[in-house]
Amino acid sequence: MSIADNIYDLHKCRVLRVYDMTDEEKLFLLRFENSETAESWTFSPGQFVQVALPGIGEIPISICSSPMRRGFFEMCIKKVGKVTDIVHTLHPGDFMGIRGPYGNGFPMAEFEDSDILLIAAGIGMVPLRSVFLYATDNRWKFGNITVINSARYGKNLLFRKELEAMRDIAEAENINIIQTVTRDPEWKGRTGRAQEHIADANTDPKNSYVVVCGPPQAYRSIFDTLIQQGYDPRNIYVTLERRMKCGVGKCGHCIAGSSTHLKYICLDGPVFGYYDIISTPGLI
Ligand SMILES: Cc1cc2nc3c(=O)[nH]c(=O)nc-3n(C[C@H](O)[C@H](O)[C@H](O)COP(=O)(O)OP(=O)(O)OC[C@H]3O[C@@H](n4cnc5c(N)ncnc54)[C@H](O)[C@@H]3O)c2cc1C
Ligand code: FES
Protein backbone atom coordinates (compact mmCIF):
# COMPACT_ATOMS: atom_id res chain seq x y z
CA MET A 1 0.00 0.00 0.00
CA SER A 2 1.40 3.43 -0.91
CA ILE A 3 1.69 6.30 1.55
CA ALA A 4 -1.27 8.12 0.03
CA ASP A 5 -3.63 5.12 0.37
CA ASN A 6 -4.14 5.24 4.13
CA ILE A 7 -4.53 8.63 5.78
CA TYR A 8 -3.87 7.06 9.20
CA ASP A 9 -0.53 5.46 8.24
CA LEU A 10 1.88 5.90 11.13
CA HIS A 11 5.54 6.25 10.15
CA LYS A 12 8.38 5.48 12.51
CA CYS A 13 10.85 8.38 12.65
CA ARG A 14 14.25 8.51 14.27
CA VAL A 15 15.32 11.65 16.10
CA LEU A 16 18.65 12.69 14.55
CA ARG A 17 19.32 15.90 16.45
CA VAL A 18 17.71 17.98 19.19
CA TYR A 19 18.53 21.69 19.55
CA ASP A 20 17.55 23.89 22.48
CA MET A 21 15.98 26.96 20.87
CA THR A 22 14.73 28.77 24.00
CA ASP A 23 13.89 27.74 27.58
CA GLU A 24 10.61 26.31 26.29
CA GLU A 25 11.12 25.27 22.67
CA LYS A 26 13.27 22.53 21.14
CA LEU A 27 13.96 21.87 17.48
CA PHE A 28 13.84 18.20 16.39
CA LEU A 29 15.48 16.92 13.23
CA LEU A 30 13.89 13.62 12.17
CA ARG A 31 14.29 10.97 9.52
CA PHE A 32 11.89 8.23 8.44
CA GLU A 33 13.17 4.76 9.29
CA ASN A 34 11.68 3.30 6.12
CA SER A 35 13.89 4.40 3.23
CA GLU A 36 11.02 4.29 0.71
CA THR A 37 8.99 6.64 2.91
CA ALA A 38 12.03 8.89 3.41
CA GLU A 39 12.35 9.27 -0.35
CA SER A 40 8.68 9.72 -1.24
CA TRP A 41 7.26 11.67 1.73
CA THR A 42 6.73 15.33 1.04
CA PHE A 43 4.61 18.24 2.24
CA SER A 44 3.74 21.89 1.56
CA PRO A 45 4.80 24.76 3.83
CA GLY A 46 1.99 25.34 6.34
CA GLN A 47 1.00 21.66 6.65
CA PHE A 48 1.23 19.82 9.95
CA VAL A 49 1.76 16.27 11.19
CA GLN A 50 0.31 14.32 14.09
CA VAL A 51 3.15 13.34 16.42
CA ALA A 52 2.33 10.07 18.17
CA LEU A 53 3.92 8.74 21.33
CA PRO A 54 2.43 5.27 21.88
CA GLY A 55 0.63 4.99 25.21
CA ILE A 56 0.90 8.76 25.81
CA GLY A 57 -0.93 10.64 23.08
CA GLU A 58 -0.91 12.45 19.78
CA ILE A 59 -0.43 16.14 19.02
CA PRO A 60 -0.58 18.29 15.88
CA ILE A 61 2.73 20.02 15.08
CA SER A 62 3.71 22.19 12.11
CA ILE A 63 6.58 21.14 9.90
CA CYS A 64 9.14 23.95 10.00
CA SER A 65 11.73 22.83 7.45
CA SER A 66 11.67 23.26 3.66
CA PRO A 67 10.07 20.55 1.53
CA MET A 68 13.01 20.98 -0.87
CA ARG A 69 15.31 19.27 1.63
CA ARG A 70 14.20 15.67 1.20
CA GLY A 71 14.71 12.67 3.47
CA PHE A 72 14.39 14.52 6.75
CA PHE A 73 12.24 17.22 8.31
CA GLU A 74 12.18 19.50 11.36
CA MET A 75 9.66 20.45 14.03
CA CYS A 76 9.98 23.08 16.74
CA ILE A 77 8.00 22.07 19.81
CA LYS A 78 7.04 24.12 22.85
CA LYS A 79 6.80 22.28 26.16
CA VAL A 80 3.29 22.94 27.45
CA GLY A 81 1.79 19.71 28.82
CA LYS A 82 1.36 15.95 28.79
CA VAL A 83 2.69 14.98 25.35
CA THR A 84 5.09 17.87 24.71
CA ASP A 85 6.74 17.30 28.13
CA ILE A 86 7.61 13.74 27.04
CA VAL A 87 8.69 14.85 23.56
CA HIS A 88 11.18 17.18 25.26
CA THR A 89 12.81 14.19 26.99
CA LEU A 90 13.64 12.51 23.62
CA HIS A 91 17.26 12.32 22.50
CA PRO A 92 19.02 11.53 19.23
CA GLY A 93 18.42 7.84 18.46
CA ASP A 94 14.94 7.81 20.04
CA PHE A 95 11.81 7.30 17.94
CA MET A 96 8.43 8.93 17.48
CA GLY A 97 5.46 8.11 15.25
CA ILE A 98 4.36 10.55 12.56
CA ARG A 99 1.01 10.67 10.71
CA GLY A 100 0.42 13.07 7.86
CA PRO A 101 1.15 15.55 6.41
CA TYR A 102 -2.28 17.07 6.93
CA GLY A 103 -4.05 20.34 6.23
CA ASN A 104 -3.95 22.59 3.20
CA GLY A 105 -0.66 24.51 3.51
CA PHE A 106 0.06 27.87 1.88
CA PRO A 107 -0.68 28.38 -1.83
CA MET A 108 3.01 28.75 -2.71
CA ALA A 109 2.39 28.50 -6.48
CA GLU A 110 0.05 31.50 -6.22
CA PHE A 111 2.79 33.50 -4.42
CA GLU A 112 5.19 33.10 -7.37
CA ASP A 113 6.33 36.35 -9.08
CA SER A 114 5.08 38.39 -6.10
CA ASP A 115 6.79 39.81 -3.03
CA ILE A 116 6.29 37.91 0.23
CA LEU A 117 5.84 39.51 3.64
CA LEU A 118 5.99 37.12 6.60
CA ILE A 119 4.81 38.44 9.97
CA ALA A 120 5.40 36.23 13.02
CA ALA A 121 4.71 36.78 16.69
CA GLY A 122 6.22 34.32 19.18
CA ILE A 123 5.82 30.67 18.19
CA GLY A 124 4.15 31.87 14.97
CA MET A 125 7.65 31.89 13.43
CA VAL A 126 7.53 28.07 13.36
CA PRO A 127 5.22 27.51 10.35
CA LEU A 128 6.53 30.67 8.69
CA ARG A 129 10.08 29.30 8.73
CA SER A 130 8.96 26.60 6.31
CA VAL A 131 7.58 29.24 3.92
CA PHE A 132 10.74 31.32 4.30
CA LEU A 133 13.12 28.40 3.66
CA TYR A 134 11.04 27.22 0.71
CA ALA A 135 11.10 30.74 -0.79
CA THR A 136 14.87 31.06 -0.30
CA ASP A 137 15.43 27.57 -1.75
CA ASN A 138 13.46 28.74 -4.82
CA ARG A 139 14.68 32.32 -4.72
CA TRP A 140 14.22 33.00 -8.47
CA LYS A 141 10.46 32.29 -8.25
CA PHE A 142 9.63 35.11 -5.84
CA GLY A 143 10.10 38.88 -5.62
CA ASN A 144 11.39 40.71 -2.53
CA ILE A 145 10.95 38.99 0.81
CA THR A 146 10.59 40.50 4.29
CA VAL A 147 10.40 38.52 7.52
CA ILE A 148 9.20 40.34 10.64
CA ASN A 149 9.96 38.12 13.62
CA SER A 150 8.63 39.41 16.95
CA ALA A 151 8.54 38.24 20.55
CA ARG A 152 8.36 39.69 24.04
CA TYR A 153 12.04 39.13 24.88
CA GLY A 154 15.13 38.61 22.73
CA LYS A 155 15.58 35.14 24.24
CA ASN A 156 12.13 34.16 22.95
CA LEU A 157 12.78 35.13 19.31
CA LEU A 158 12.63 31.79 17.55
CA PHE A 159 15.29 31.12 14.88
CA ARG A 160 16.87 34.45 15.83
CA LYS A 161 20.46 33.26 15.30
CA GLU A 162 19.64 31.51 12.04
CA LEU A 163 18.03 34.69 10.72
CA GLU A 164 20.90 36.87 11.99
CA ALA A 165 23.43 34.59 10.30
CA MET A 166 21.62 35.09 6.99
CA ARG A 167 21.55 38.86 7.14
CA ASP A 168 24.50 39.63 4.80
CA ILE A 169 23.46 37.14 2.12
CA ALA A 170 19.87 38.19 2.63
CA GLU A 171 20.53 41.86 1.79
CA ALA A 172 22.25 40.86 -1.44
CA GLU A 173 19.21 38.79 -2.33
CA ASN A 174 16.58 41.44 -1.50
CA ILE A 175 15.54 39.68 1.67
CA ASN A 176 14.83 41.98 4.59
CA ILE A 177 15.01 40.48 8.08
CA ILE A 178 13.45 42.48 10.91
CA GLN A 179 13.56 41.15 14.49
CA THR A 180 11.75 43.11 17.16
CA VAL A 181 10.86 42.67 20.83
CA THR A 182 8.25 44.34 23.00
CA ARG A 183 9.42 44.05 26.61
CA ASP A 184 13.16 43.46 26.80
CA PRO A 185 15.20 46.28 28.41
CA GLU A 186 18.45 44.44 27.51
CA TRP A 187 17.62 44.20 23.80
CA LYS A 188 19.75 46.44 21.54
CA GLY A 189 17.77 46.02 18.33
CA ARG A 190 14.33 47.11 17.15
CA THR A 191 11.49 47.31 19.63
CA GLY A 192 7.72 47.35 19.34
CA ARG A 193 5.08 45.04 17.95
CA ALA A 194 5.39 43.43 14.53
CA GLN A 195 2.86 45.73 12.88
CA GLU A 196 4.93 48.80 13.84
CA HIS A 197 7.60 47.63 11.37
CA ILE A 198 5.43 46.80 8.37
CA ALA A 199 6.24 50.18 6.79
CA ASP A 200 9.93 49.14 6.68
CA ALA A 201 9.27 46.00 4.65
CA ASN A 202 10.84 45.89 1.18
CA THR A 203 7.61 44.45 -0.24
CA ASP A 204 5.33 46.32 -2.65
CA PRO A 205 1.82 46.39 -1.11
CA LYS A 206 0.32 46.25 -4.61
CA ASN A 207 2.16 43.05 -5.53
CA SER A 208 2.62 41.07 -2.32
CA TYR A 209 1.33 38.06 -0.49
CA VAL A 210 1.31 38.33 3.28
CA VAL A 211 1.37 35.49 5.80
CA VAL A 212 0.64 36.19 9.46
CA CYS A 213 1.06 33.78 12.36
CA GLY A 214 0.89 34.48 16.06
CA PRO A 215 -1.63 34.80 18.87
CA PRO A 216 -5.09 35.43 17.32
CA GLN A 217 -5.61 38.53 19.51
CA ALA A 218 -2.82 40.23 17.53
CA TYR A 219 -4.45 39.61 14.14
CA ARG A 220 -6.96 42.44 14.05
CA SER A 221 -4.37 45.14 14.57
CA ILE A 222 -1.94 43.53 12.07
CA PHE A 223 -4.71 43.27 9.44
CA ASP A 224 -5.72 46.91 10.00
CA THR A 225 -2.13 48.11 9.56
CA LEU A 226 -1.63 46.01 6.41
CA ILE A 227 -4.84 47.27 4.81
CA GLN A 228 -4.08 50.89 5.76
CA GLN A 229 -0.71 50.52 4.02
CA GLY A 230 -2.33 49.28 0.82
CA TYR A 231 -1.90 45.50 1.06
CA ASP A 232 -4.70 43.63 -0.71
CA PRO A 233 -6.83 41.71 1.84
CA ARG A 234 -7.31 38.94 -0.76
CA ASN A 235 -3.57 38.27 -0.51
CA ILE A 236 -3.41 37.99 3.28
CA TYR A 237 -3.19 34.51 4.83
CA VAL A 238 -3.01 33.25 8.39
CA THR A 239 -2.39 29.85 9.91
CA LEU A 240 -4.43 28.83 12.95
CA GLU A 241 -4.09 26.46 15.89
CA ARG A 242 -6.94 24.57 17.51
CA ARG A 243 -7.41 21.61 19.81
CA MET A 244 -7.39 18.62 17.46
CA LYS A 245 -7.84 14.88 17.82
CA CYS A 246 -7.92 13.05 14.50
CA GLY A 247 -6.33 15.72 12.27
CA VAL A 248 -8.25 14.42 9.25
CA GLY A 249 -11.80 15.80 9.47
CA LYS A 250 -13.46 12.84 11.25
CA CYS A 251 -13.87 13.70 14.94
CA GLY A 252 -15.25 17.27 14.79
CA HIS A 253 -12.96 18.57 17.55
CA CYS A 254 -11.61 21.46 15.48
CA ILE A 255 -14.82 22.76 13.90
CA ALA A 256 -15.41 26.53 13.92
CA GLY A 257 -18.10 28.76 12.44
CA SER A 258 -21.85 28.54 11.90
CA SER A 259 -23.91 26.16 9.76
CA THR A 260 -23.48 28.45 6.75
CA HIS A 261 -19.74 28.97 7.29
CA LEU A 262 -18.54 25.73 8.84
CA LYS A 263 -14.78 25.09 8.80
CA TYR A 264 -12.69 22.14 9.89
CA ILE A 265 -9.38 23.67 10.93
CA CYS A 266 -7.56 20.39 10.22
CA LEU A 267 -9.05 19.91 6.76
CA ASP A 268 -10.02 23.36 5.42
CA GLY A 269 -7.01 24.90 7.21
CA PRO A 270 -4.89 25.43 9.15
CA VAL A 271 -4.19 28.11 6.51
CA PHE A 272 -7.05 30.54 5.90
CA GLY A 273 -7.44 33.68 3.84
CA TYR A 274 -8.43 37.04 5.30
CA TYR A 275 -12.02 36.79 4.00
CA ASP A 276 -12.45 33.30 5.51
CA ILE A 277 -11.41 34.75 8.84
CA ILE A 278 -13.83 37.66 8.80
CA SER A 279 -16.77 35.66 7.42
CA THR A 280 -16.46 32.64 9.75
CA PRO A 281 -17.54 33.30 13.34
CA GLY A 282 -15.13 31.92 15.93
CA LEU A 283 -12.32 31.14 13.51
CA ILE A 284 -10.04 33.42 15.51
C1 LIG B 1 -2.21 22.77 13.20
C2 LIG B 1 -1.44 22.92 14.50
C3 LIG B 1 -0.07 23.11 14.44
C4 LIG B 1 0.66 23.25 15.62
N1 LIG B 1 2.01 23.43 15.52
C5 LIG B 1 2.74 23.51 16.63
C6 LIG B 1 4.18 23.63 16.54
O1 LIG B 1 4.75 23.68 15.44
N2 LIG B 1 4.87 23.68 17.70
C7 LIG B 1 4.25 23.63 18.93
O2 LIG B 1 4.95 23.67 19.94
N3 LIG B 1 2.91 23.53 19.05
C8 LIG B 1 2.15 23.46 17.93
N4 LIG B 1 0.79 23.31 18.05
C9 LIG B 1 0.19 23.26 19.39
C10 LIG B 1 0.37 21.84 19.96
O3 LIG B 1 -0.40 20.93 19.20
C11 LIG B 1 -0.09 21.82 21.42
O4 LIG B 1 0.77 22.62 22.19
C12 LIG B 1 -0.07 20.39 21.95
O5 LIG B 1 -1.13 19.67 21.37
C13 LIG B 1 -0.17 20.36 23.46
O6 LIG B 1 -0.18 19.00 23.86
P1 LIG B 1 0.21 18.56 25.34
O7 LIG B 1 -0.31 17.16 25.52
O8 LIG B 1 1.67 18.74 25.58
O9 LIG B 1 -0.54 19.60 26.22
P2 LIG B 1 -1.88 19.37 27.09
O10 LIG B 1 -1.48 18.65 28.35
O11 LIG B 1 -2.94 18.76 26.23
O12 LIG B 1 -2.26 20.87 27.35
C14 LIG B 1 -1.39 21.76 28.05
C15 LIG B 1 -1.87 23.18 27.90
O13 LIG B 1 -1.79 23.61 26.52
C16 LIG B 1 -3.06 24.03 26.04
N5 LIG B 1 -3.18 23.58 24.66
C17 LIG B 1 -3.14 22.31 24.22
N6 LIG B 1 -3.29 22.26 22.88
C18 LIG B 1 -3.42 23.53 22.46
C19 LIG B 1 -3.61 24.15 21.20
N7 LIG B 1 -3.73 23.48 20.06
N8 LIG B 1 -3.68 25.48 21.15
C20 LIG B 1 -3.58 26.20 22.28
N9 LIG B 1 -3.42 25.69 23.50
C21 LIG B 1 -3.33 24.38 23.60
C22 LIG B 1 -4.05 23.36 26.97
O14 LIG B 1 -5.27 24.07 27.04
C23 LIG B 1 -3.33 23.38 28.29
O15 LIG B 1 -3.43 24.62 28.92
C24 LIG B 1 0.02 23.19 16.88
C25 LIG B 1 -1.36 23.01 16.94
C26 LIG B 1 -2.07 22.88 15.77
C27 LIG B 1 -3.55 22.66 15.82
S1 FES C 1 -9.26 17.29 14.41
FE1 FES C 1 -10.82 15.83 14.03
S2 FES C 1 -12.13 16.91 12.68
FE2 FES C 1 -10.42 18.23 12.85
Image (cartoon, rainbow, N blue to C red):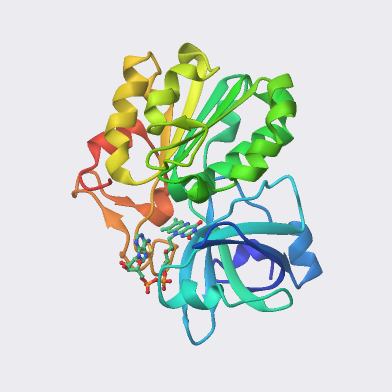
Number of dots carrying numbers: 0
Question: Does 115 sit left or right of 255 as displayed?
Answer: right
Residue 194 visible in this rendered orientation of the protein: yes
Q: Is residue 145 above or below residue 31?
A: above
- Give the residue drawn at x 24%, y 41%: 280
- Give the residue drawn at x 64%, y 38%: 163
Q: x%, y% of residue 93?
A: 74, 77
**Furthest-bottom residue in this view:** 55
**Furthest-front residue in this view:** 186
Based on the displayed image, in which of its 4 quarters is residue 202 positioned? top right
Question: Does 62 sit left or right of 31 as displayed?
Answer: left
The C terminus: image quadrant:
top left
Residue 10 visible in this rendered orientation of the protein: no
Q: Is residue 7 above or below residue 213?
A: below
The N terminus: image quadrant:
bottom right
Report the image quarter containing ligand 1: bottom left
The one of 201 and 30 positioned closer to us in this rendering: 201
Q: Is residue 71 above or below residue 202?
A: below
The one of 249 and 184 positioned closer to us in this rendering: 184
Question: Does 282 sit left or right of 50 as displayed?
Answer: left
Based on the displayed image, in which of its 4 quarters is residue 253 positioned? bottom left
Q: x%, y% of residue 11?
A: 65, 72
The one of 17 and 239 positioned closer to us in this rendering: 17
- Give the residue drawn at x 31%, y 44%: 216
Q: x%, y% of residue 210?
A: 47, 28
